[in-house]
Image: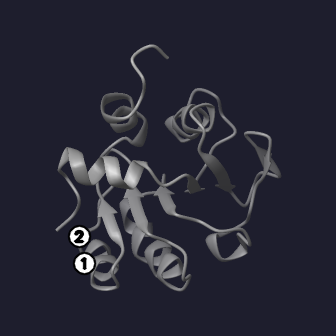
Amino acid sequence: MPVETPDELRRILEYDRVAVVGASTSHEKAAHIVPAYLQRHGYEIRPINPTATEIFGEQAADSLPDVASPIDIVEIFRPSEEVPEIVAEALDRDDVKAIWMQAGIRNDEAARAAEAAGVDVVQDRCMKVEHGQLIRNPMD
């Protein structure tokens, strides 16, 4: 079952290395706003976008397998039909602890595959919203 309880979400939000598949250079898009927020709150962001060279001051990778540094969470900003391939790439790594599908994105089959491999899955939830509600210091 995908992660849904506040305690489980908090546990995942405690990880700090996030690969953002579909990170955007467009400042008005959620795929830029959300990871930029996470970076401001201490997360190490690894942007993945084959059409960009740098996002958030970080070198952008072409794909998940191209990320050489460790990853805890794979955050997905791609259409739901692309999720199975992204999850398969995540499962080929030995460092991914969670798959986070942003609001509006879900793929139950891919979620089951990740869970069967021991990886936590969050579907159809905004990481920025959850962080703001569950983690962020109200004085920020």
Hey, which quadrant is residue 122 in on the image?
bottom left
Q: Is residue 9 above or below residue 25?
A: below
Residue 21: % across, % down? 57, 58
Picture residue at 80% right of the left edge, 40% below the top: 57
Mark 1 neighbour class, 10 Å CA radius: few under 14, some 14 to 19, many 20 or more? some
Picture residue at 59% right of the left edge, 65% below the top: 71
The residue pinned by badge 2 equals 108
- Residue 117 visible in the picture: yes
Hey, which quadrant is residue 20 in on the image?
bottom right
Left or right: residue 36 versus residue 119 is right
- Residue 124 visible in the picture: no
Mark 2 lies on a secondary structure that is: helix
Q: Are marks 2 and 1 in contact (CB under 8 Å)?
A: yes
Disc 1 residue type (three-letter): Arg
The residue pinned by badge 1 equals 112
Q: Which colour assignment does the render follow?
A: one colour
Mark 2 neighbour class, 10 Å CA radius: few under 14, some 14 to 19, many 20 or more? some
Gap in Å between the C-alphas at discs 2 and 1? 6 Å
Disc 2 residue type (three-letter): Asp
Instruction: Give the mark toward the camera: 2 or 1.
Output: 1
Residue 108: % across, % down? 23, 70
Is 107 in front, or is 64? 64
Mark 1 lies on a secondary structure that is: helix
Residue 24: % across, % down? 63, 43
